[in-house]
Image (cartoon, helix red, strand yellow):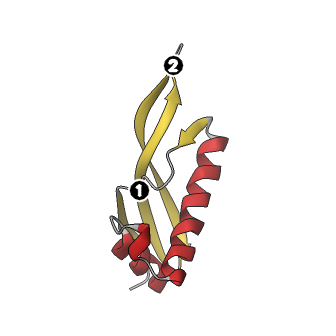
Amino acid sequence: MKSIEVTYDVSVRGSEVWEPGEAAFRLDFVDDDIAALLQKLVGTPVSRMSDYEYYIWRKLDRVLDNLETLRKRVYLNNSIKSIKIVGGDN
């Protein structure tokens, strides 16, 4: 299992307007193969992904969307900038 750090764009509520920002989140216990696949897919247009790759990518996208809702921020769909493997078994 691996830990990955995902960096992506969000909108944060300022005093009067939503302001763009960047956020990061660490996901622990990600399967080694899935972590490598997600890292490989960063920057790949959805139209070039296989059905399985798209399925996995959308799952991560949904996790981030739900997480940012709990943080009272808005996740900008498909805005993942980077995925780094930051820990786990080798």
The residue sitting at 61% across, 59% down in the picture is 62
Residue 60 left/right relative to 32: right
The residue sitting at 42% across, 44% down in the picture is 9
Q: Amino acid at mark 2?
A: Val
Q: Secondary structure at mark 2?
A: loop
Q: Is residue 28 visible?
A: yes
State yes or no: discs 2 and 1 in contact (Cβ < 8 Å): no
Above or below — where is 47 with respect to 20? below
Q: Amino acid at mark 1?
A: Ile
Residue placed most toward the observer, 44 or 12: 44
Q: Earlier in the sequence, mark 2 or mark 1?
A: 2
Residue 34: percent from left, percent from top: 48, 80
Residue 34 left/right relative to 69: left
Circle 2 residue = 17
Disc 2 versus disc 1: distance between alpha carbons? 23 Å
Circle 1 residue = 80
Check the picture and name the quadrant holding the C terminus: bottom left
Crowding near the residue tagged with mark 1, few <14, some 14–19, many ≥20 C-alpha atoms within 10 Å: many
The residue sitting at 51% across, 30% down in the picture is 12
Residue 37: percent from left, percent from top: 42, 79
Crowding near the residue tagged with mark 2, few <14, some 14–19, many ≥20 C-alpha atoms within 10 Å: few
Q: Is residue 1 visible?
A: no
Q: Secondary structure at mark 1?
A: loop
Q: Please tell me in which quadrant of the rendered image residue 43 appears.
A: bottom left
